[in-house]
């Protein structure tokens, strides 16, 4: 399935780019936002695409003429080192915190609960991570599992799910995403299941966040990205769940309260009815933008 970027025109428009702008796209992904950005940049403009997943850089298709293009395989938490290495000061920074469709459907790392894939859930090379989803599921204690499932997944039945995982692994190691999903589905009572998502969705989210330290990386990215941003530069973030959005909102408010930034929109921008219909993943997307002063 082709990945469709969310809030594409709203996001790029909010960056207020000129042909000579330097733009950091901190989540290159499939290049959807990148192609639209490059359409607005001239030969003196610079586009930096960052992604922790090396397959994104290998597979992305971007225009070969026009602005200078720099692609970097790196976690966006290290944005400061990326711009310092290339001696750049961004006029705009964008990050889409969602996931590419192909990462779930074709990644082979256990992100999708529909596939018999190994439990990895790492953005990049599993060997560069402290632990994988397999370690979390098969080695972490019941209390630790419950805490991350409740805290990162906001799963109301975290205790039941954690207990079911621990009980199941006593019979043998849980090796695949589908096996884990079946265990979770059996643990979540039918009366407590959300109507529009798989009962394993929240637990998979929690494990993925823990494996990749997503919230810690986001906090570091916001701090280092804002520090690197040029005066009058714009910083745009698209979030998809409340944990991310809460961190972004809090950081934005801190910069505004301290007199370092201004809010460009009173409320976050969300997808209109047409986009929600054609691209269902946009339903939970929120775009927040600030300008550094």
Image (cartoon, rainbow, N blue to C red):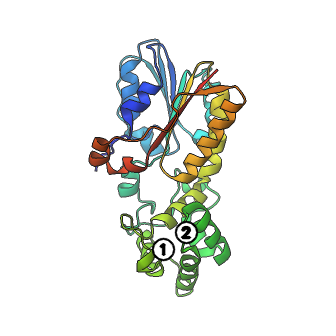
Residue 211: percent from left, percent from top: 59, 59
Please state which of residues 222 and 189 is positioned toward the viewer in this rendering: 189
Residue at far right of view: 258
**Residue 104, image quadrant:** bottom left
Residue 190, image x, y percentages: 41, 79
Q: Residue visible at 40% across and 31% down? A: 10
Query: Residue 175, which numbered label?
Result: 1
Q: Secondary structure at mark 2?
A: helix
**Residue 81 seen anywhere in this rendered image of the structure:** no
Using the image as rendered, state which of residue 85 and residue 191 is in the foreground. Answer: 191
Q: Residue at x 55, y 46 (%)?
A: 245
Q: Is residue 269 above or below residue 194?
A: above
Looking at the rendered structure, which numbered label has been put on residue 134?
A: 2
**Quarter of the C terminus within the rendering:** top right
Neighbourhood count class around disc 2 (C-alpha, 10 Å): few under 14, some 14–19, many 20 upward:
many
Where disc 1 sits, the SS reads loop
Position above or below: 105 against 176: above
């Amino acid at each position: 399935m082709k990945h469709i970027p969310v809030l594409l025109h709203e996001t790029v428009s909010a960056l207020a780019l000129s042909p000579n702008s330097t733009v950091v796209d901190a989540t290159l992904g499939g290049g959807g936002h990148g192609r639209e950005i490059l359409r607005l940049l001239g030969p003196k403009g610079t586009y930096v695409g960052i992604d922790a997943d090396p397959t994104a850089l290998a597979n992305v298709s971007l225009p070969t003429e026009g602005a200078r293009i720099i692609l970097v395989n790196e976690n966006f938490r290290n944005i400061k080192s990326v711009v310092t290495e290339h001696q750049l000061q961004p006029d705009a920074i964008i990050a889409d915190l969602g996931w590419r469709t192909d990462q779930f459907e074709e990644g082979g790392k256990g992100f999708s609960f529909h596939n018999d894939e190994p439990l990895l859930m790492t953005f990049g090379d599993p060997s560069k991570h402290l632990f994988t989803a397999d370690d979390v599921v098969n080695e972490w204690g019941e209390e630790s599992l419950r805490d991350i499932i409740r805290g990162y997944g906001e799963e109301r039945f975290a205790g039941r799910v954690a207990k079911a995982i621990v009980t199941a692994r006593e019979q043998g190691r849980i090796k695949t995403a589908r096996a884990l999903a079946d265990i979770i589905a059996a643990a979540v009572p039918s009366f407590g299941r959300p109507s529009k998502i798989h009962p394993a969705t929240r637990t998979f989210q929690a494990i993925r966040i823990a494996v990749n330290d997503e919230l810690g990386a986001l906090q570091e990215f916001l701090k280092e990205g804002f520090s690197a941003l040029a005066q009058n530069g714009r910083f745009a973030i698209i979030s998809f769940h409340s944990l991310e959005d809460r961190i972004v909102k809090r950081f934005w408010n801190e910069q505004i309260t301290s007199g370092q930034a201004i809010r460009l929109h009173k409320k976050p921008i969300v997808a209109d009815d047409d986009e929600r219909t054609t691209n269902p993943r946009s339903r939970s997307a929120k775009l927040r933008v600030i300008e550094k002063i």
